[in-house]
Amino acid sequence: MTGKTAFRALAAALLLNGTMPAFAQEADPNTLAPSSDPKRVANGLALTPPMGWNSWNKFACNVNEKIIRDTADAMASNGMKDAGYRYIVIDDCWHGQRDENGFVTADPVKFPSGIKALADYIHSKGLKFGIYSDAGRQTCGGRPGSQGHEYQDALTYARWGVDYLKYDWCNTGTRNAEEAYALMADALRATGRDIVFSLCEWGNNRPWLWGQKIGNLWRTTGDITDKWEGKYGYSWGMLNILDMNEPLWPFAGPGHWNDPDMLEVGNGGMTDAEYRSHFSLWAIMAAPLIAGNDIANMDAATREILLNRDVIAVNQDALGVQGRRVSRDGNREVWVKPLSGGGRAVVLFNRSAQPETISLGWEALGYPATLKASIRDLWAHKDLKPAVGGYSATVPGHGVVMLKVQP
Ligand code: GLA
């Protein structure tokens, strides 16, 4: 670890929790060391960030089995499955009542065929199926929560064929977050089924400090909204979420990821350039890539963003280090993620509305200035001329240039 990097990790840890957790020292982009310690792994799942789709950002409570089936059909046939997207996750509001024995049921009007049939359908397409619950007595949408029914619900999910659980934090009163999430993790483990566990308590109780042994991903912030910037009630624009998630880079690694919330790409509130930035920055942060748009009815520009395999490869790199901002000069930023094989992914990010020239020196990547490196432009899908010392590019307003640099 270089002096500067060590200082940065220490500062981040002090800022976040007042003490220096042992594993915060392990993620060092310059030594290429991932932060996973096998003793602390929750379940061996999600060794790369989960990829899939979730109903909430686009459909909120208006979900039904037709939407979910159409989405599965789309994912299986539009190239997303081939690009690595796997999980189809129904968020809040799928629930009916609990039956006379306390077992949860599906809303009989929205899901007349039942959840098991839906899961079977999704599995028949070679995809995986996720569902949503809450650690309180009610979900955020007022449906039955899992408090007091943890083992019963986990068993129900396993019988239905659930592969992923997003577990929310509404109506939890005075519950202790770590205990509440650990209880559900135990219940899921007791079923014997492989179920990715997604903790959604919005970063309130610093889940990056204890989530690794419990689940595979934890939300680090409140809800994202389909806007470039700003605060909207309990929700935040993309830039705000980005800046909250960035300093947490030391806590991510294979099997345990910071989750800055689902993608808004294609939902209409940002420009295509802004969505390219959103997708590139989520990818370089090793964030879960969970599409949140109507993938059964998306336009070509949206498709091209979600299906950019060069960018997806950065996100899914086996080393599993979360990229971070290494320099910021006004609106001009350089983000770097070390990759297996010694290369680096780079995002040159322009926060201003006007084009800006952003320069990158190889030292920012931990390389000697004299090094000759090959460069690939991940949005142009083109190999550029190998360069010595660095690279500079004109970056469109609110846009990115994303590169892979390989010595
Ligand atoms: C919370 C979560 C969201 C979504 C809704 C559902 O706000 O953070 O991601 O799951 O609840 O009600």
Image (cartoon, rainbow, N blue to C red):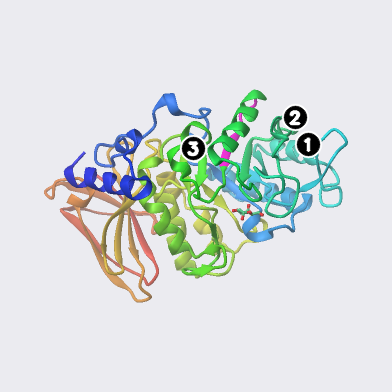
Q: Are marks 1 and 3 in contact (CB under 8 Å)?
A: no
In the picture, the disc for residue 116 is 1
Q: Position of residue 282 (x, y in %)?
A: 45, 53
Residue 197 shown in magenta = yes
Q: Position of residue 292 (x, y in %)?
A: 60, 56
Q: Which label lies toward us, 2 or 1?
A: 2
- In the picture, measured across the screen, residue 58 lies left or right of residue 286, that is right
Q: Are marks 2 and 3 in contact (CB under 8 Å)?
A: no
| Badge 1 residue CB within 8 Å of ligand 1 | no
Q: Which label lies toward us, 2 or 3?
A: 3
- Amino acid at dot 1: Lys
The residue sitting at 33% across, 74% down in the picture is: 355
Q: Position of residue 348 (x, y in %)?
A: 31, 60
Q: Which comes before the other along the chain, label 1 or label 3?
A: 1
Residue closest to the eye, 126 or 38? 38
Q: Are marks 2 and 1 in contact (CB under 8 Å)?
A: yes
Instruction: Sort mark 3 into few (<14), some (14-19) or many (20+) by Cα contacts within 10 Å.
Output: many
Residue that extends furthest to the right in the rendered view of this protein = 100
Q: Secondary structure at mark 1?
A: helix
As displayed, is residue 373 above or below residue 240? above
| Badge 3 residue CB within 8 Å of ligand 1 | no
Picture quarter containing residue 10?
top left
Q: Which residue is mark 2?
A: 159
Q: Which residue is mark 3?
A: 211
Q: Which residues are the magenta region?
A: 193-198
Residue 274 shown in magenta = no
Mark 1 and mark 3: span between their CA atoms? 29 Å
- In the picture, measured across the screen, residue 368 lies left or right of residue 258, that is left
- Amino acid at dot 2: Arg
The residue sitting at 29% across, 71% down in the picture is: 356
